[in-house]
Amino acid sequence: MAQKNKTKTPEQIKYDQMQKKHELKRPILKNCIRAFFVGGTICLIGQGITYLYIYYFDFTEKTAGNPTVATMVFIAMLLTGFGIYDRLGQFGGAGSAVPVTGFGNAVISSAIEHRTEGFVLGVGGNMFKLAGSVIVFGVFSAFVVALVKTFITQWGGF
């Protein structure tokens, strides 16, 4: 810090001091608590949906995961379309972005933003800019994991 101040003029140093004096302090602890509770509530809702699939549709704990994720992404997309998820994101920050619902929000937000360009080039093209890379990475990762598992089970380990 002292090294940087040597190259600055006295006016610049005075300005930096004034800026630090008037700079708003970010409420980091408050933001962390909000993110924790928003993310936890989203996960709690997801767990409730999982239990609904298990008890009303005869899924097992293993098989209820995929429809739960699809349902959560669908709900996030609906809430984004109605403008509710954006307000939740402003309040909860990373707590709304980290769960899978954040992915649904990001996909549908880009689609809504480019809807004036048409359904194919605007909505479809921009919606899959984010989703396309995630889907490709997921398919490729699943292929590599399946390949490794096949080798391990075929030859009984290394």
Image (cartoon, grey):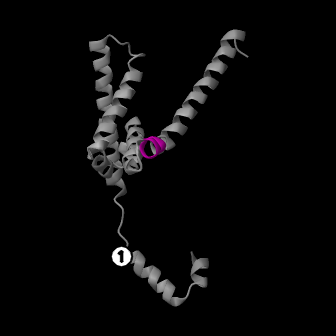
Q: Indicate left or right for 47 with 146 as reference.
A: left
Left or right position of 144 against 24:
right
Q: Residue at x 61, y 24 (%)?
A: 143
* Mark 1 crowdedness (10 Å alpha carbons): few <14, some 14-19, many ≥20: few
Picture layout, residue 139 above or below residue 127: above
Q: Is residue 40 visible?
A: no
> Considering the numbered disc 1 on the image, is that residue within a helix, a strand or a loop?
helix
Mark 1 residue type: His
Count of labels in the image: 1
Residue 151, horizontal then vertical, whole percent: 69, 15
Give residue 145's quadrant in the image. Answer: top right
Q: Residue furthest bottom?
A: 10
Magenta residue check for 157: no
Residue at the spot of label 1: 22
Q: Position of residue 127 (x, y in %)?
A: 45, 42
Task: Reply above or below: 17 against 36.
Answer: below
Range covered by the magenta-colored residues: 120-125
Q: Can you give x and y, in whole percent of width and height, for residue 78 in the image?
A: 29, 37
Viewer-closest of 125 and 80: 125
Given residues 71 and 132, the one toward you in this image is: 132
122 is within the stretch colored magenta: yes
Position of the C terminus, as image quadrant, is top right
**Magenta span main SS:** helix
Location of residue 28 in the rendering, given as x and y in whole percent from the top left corner? 37, 56
> Would you place residue 113 above or below residue 108 in this image?
below
Image quadrant in which you'd find residue 81: top left
